[in-house]
Image (spheres, grey):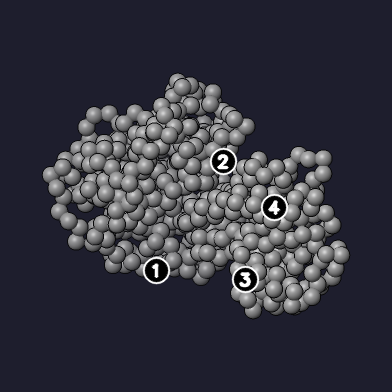
Amino acid sequence: MPHAATASEADAAAPVGEPVGPLERGLAVLRALAAHPGPRMRPGDLVRATGLARSTVDRIVATLTHLGYLRVEDDRDVLLAPRLMELGNAYLTCCGLPDALEPLAVALADELDESVSLAVPDRAGVRFISQSTRRRTMALAFQIGDLLPAERCAPGALFASDWGPEQQADWRARLRDDPLDAGFPAVPPRSAPPAPDEVESAFRQRVADARGAGWAVDDQLIEPGLVAVAVPVHAPDGSTVCALSVVSHTSRHSARSLAEHALPRLREYGARMEAALASSAPPATPPAPGGPDTSRAAKAELGPEFLQSLTRGLAVLTALGSAPGGLTLSGAAEATGLARATARRALLSLQQLGYAAPAGEGRRFTLLPTVLELGYARLSRLSFAEIAQPHLVRLVEQVHDSASVAVLADDDIMYVARVHTVRIMSVNITVGTRFPAYATSMGRVLLAGLPEREAAERLARASVRPLTRFTRVDAADLAEAVAQARRDGHALVDQELEEGLRSIAVPVHDRTGRVVAAVNVSTHASRGTLDDVRRAVLPALTAAASAIEADLAVVTERVRLSIP
């Protein structure tokens, strides 16, 4: 059982004072970037979007860039960085629902051969926390973190049954202030403002129908052709914690036929999910203490441009996701290395800003789904190439030669990302280009990442031929080259693909340690010896691969990413 709350922990549930200013303003900048239609904003755009002073915006951007949550391109364009998904991942761990329920959602999607979603109420809207989609031409495009208007989706009618006066008032205000649903980028905006009274009347009827039937339907409310059926999933105390939905297209089902097809299984799996929640329990002991507070060192290094309070507040936010059920005040302080008073101010600020709430009679603080508004859905849409590209740009700036990322494609490598350097003599290769794996540095580290038997089978069936007078074609020699790459952790190929071309590559691993890609630098053979290449390029190349791996691990912690 969790330990009893101390007096100070119980007091922490009572909001006091104003939120910590730097944390509040930093979150405002993140929200502005996440809501912006384009992928990047300039500081002036952020000033206009947030109402903050330019100097404040500059300090926030500098701090968040240091933390890895933002990146700056061309000295002024500000973009969300994949590491920002740490915040959303913290909520998804803290709430515990994906870990407990997603395996059942995946099984239901496989059984029905339709897309299945889990969604939670977020203020007067509906936010996705899990997606198990089918690969079809007419496929579901929603991502984890996307927010839908409650009145335009099936889960909304289920959640609205539990709304109190405050949530109802919030919903009416939102309908009045955003009649076209422009604040919901995941859904097509309305073509004309609807009559609020008609929307409210129709929604009330749908809520009443859902309350009476125990399930809800979306008959093309989000967009033409999209139909869905949803059932509530209840916590042991009877409250609705999430909705389980099956989504299809009118080319496959009408709303009525989808209900006939899916509802019996939806109810069965909903009951199984409720049983899974009833059998799960918060951790009996707090998680192990985290590392020390590093914000002091960063402040000393970066000076007044670094916002220590913002850094500490975000550290507390991510710490709340270290275990399902959140943390006590003591647990948050231990996990972040902060003083209890500092952790308490951050917790109260997060509570007042709508990102955290006390739970379990005030003993623990948990994160709220609103955390996912901080760019999670946008970053969930990144491709593998988009994750790798910024790191290739930085690598090329360091080594002044072209860099690429490739994956195995049958017996070839295929380029999926590429950054050229500007030289009179440069290597002209484009994304999508394929070369024989046996004759390339990336091919050898990719083969080295396979089980030895599979690598040997691939080499045995490859159509090996001399591409230059330096190409290794002897089977034993090639096997040794792959084994050497496995031992060294890199491969260096000298003029075997094309005379004059030298390339060095290292593997890229996913979060399980599996080699999924390779990154290389290509240069002309006249630029030094092989040892010169290793000394000049390998450290930066290894660092770039590690940075890609770190971003990949954060993105794929909760999101399925297809690597070509």
On the image, which quarter does residue 542 sit in? Answer: bottom right
Q: Secondary structure at mark 2?
A: loop
Query: Which one is nearer the viewer's eye here, 399 or 11?
Result: 399
Residue at x 65%, y 69% (from the top left corner): 484
Which marked residue is nearer to the observer: mark 2 or mark 3? Answer: 3
* Residue type highlighted by circle 4: Val
Q: CA distance from mark 2 to mark 3?
A: 44 Å
> In the image, what residue type sits under mark 2?
Pro
Residue 268's label in the rendered image is 1
Position of 63 compared to 332: left or right? right
Residue 100 in the image: x percent, y percent? Answer: 37, 63
The local secondary structure at tag 3 comes to: loop
Residue under numbered circle 3: 450
The residue that mark 4 highlights is 533
> In the image, 117: left or right of 403?
left
Identify which amino acid the numbered label 3 is placed on: Leu
In this rendering, which labeled residue sits more in front, label 4 or label 2?
Answer: 4
Quick one: quadrant of the N terminus?
bottom left
- The amino acid type of the residue labelled 1 equals Glu
The residue sitting at 60% across, 63% down in the picture is: 489
Which residue is at the front of the view, 81 or 67? 67
Can residue 224 be seen here? The reply is no
> Residue 321: which disc?
none
Q: Which mark is residue 188?
A: 2
As drawn, 490 above or below 52: below
- Marks 2 and 3, the one that precedes in the sequence: 2
Q: Alpha-carbon distance for marks 1 and 3?
A: 41 Å
Identify which residue, 355 or 161, lies in the foreground: 355
- The residue sitting at 50% across, 55% down in the picture is 553
